[in-house]
Amino acid sequence: MAKTYWNIANLQTAQNNLDGSLENYGKAVEIYQQLAIDEPDNSRHLRNVALTNKNIGSVLQLRGNYENALAHFQKSLSIDSENATKNPNDVSAQLDLSFTYGTIASALRDAKNFKAQSKITKKPSK
């Protein structure tokens, strides 16, 4: 069911129905969070929580709500950082983390917070 909400939200975002998009991403993330609790050994659920939070953040960014967008990107960053650290040879985990840094930098740029953006974009690689 979460995937259905996710797909509907993607369509709504493409149609600029941002209220509907946020509602359906919200439903999807709730389901993914519960799945992550119910099946803690299945890392896919946490990854989906992170991806959905990135999408929520992107919609909020489109609306100019940078503070809340960044809060959702930070949730993704927490999950993606942990996953990338646990799985250093997992290319998907490393890409997820890099995309999250990119979304944060983009939101900071749009919010004209260039000082914080430069800290994100110059983060040293491991």
Image (cartoon, rainbow, N blue to C red):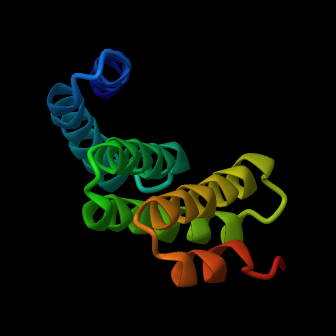
Instruction: Name the residue at 34% across, 26% down.
Output: 6
Q: Nearer the viewer, residue 22 or 89?
A: 22
Instruction: Name the residue at 47% across, 45% down.
Output: 51
Q: Quadrant of the N terminus?
A: top left
Image coords of residue 123 (percent x, y): 72, 80
Vertical side of 4 occupied by 110: above or below: below
Q: Is residue 33 left or right of residue 80?
A: left
Image coords of residue 16 (percent x, y): 28, 22
Instruction: Name the residue at 30% across, 28% down.
Output: 2
The tally of labels here is: 0
The quarter of the displayed image where residue 68 is located: bottom left
Image coords of residue 56 (percent x, y): 32, 45
Q: Is residue 76 left or right of residue 69?
A: right
Instruction: Name the residue at 62% across, 58% down.
Output: 102
Q: Nearer the viewer, residue 39 or 105?
A: 105
Q: In this view, which residue lies farthest toward the front?
A: 112
Q: Is residue 9 left or right of residue 54?
A: left
Q: Is residue 44 left or right of residue 90?
A: left
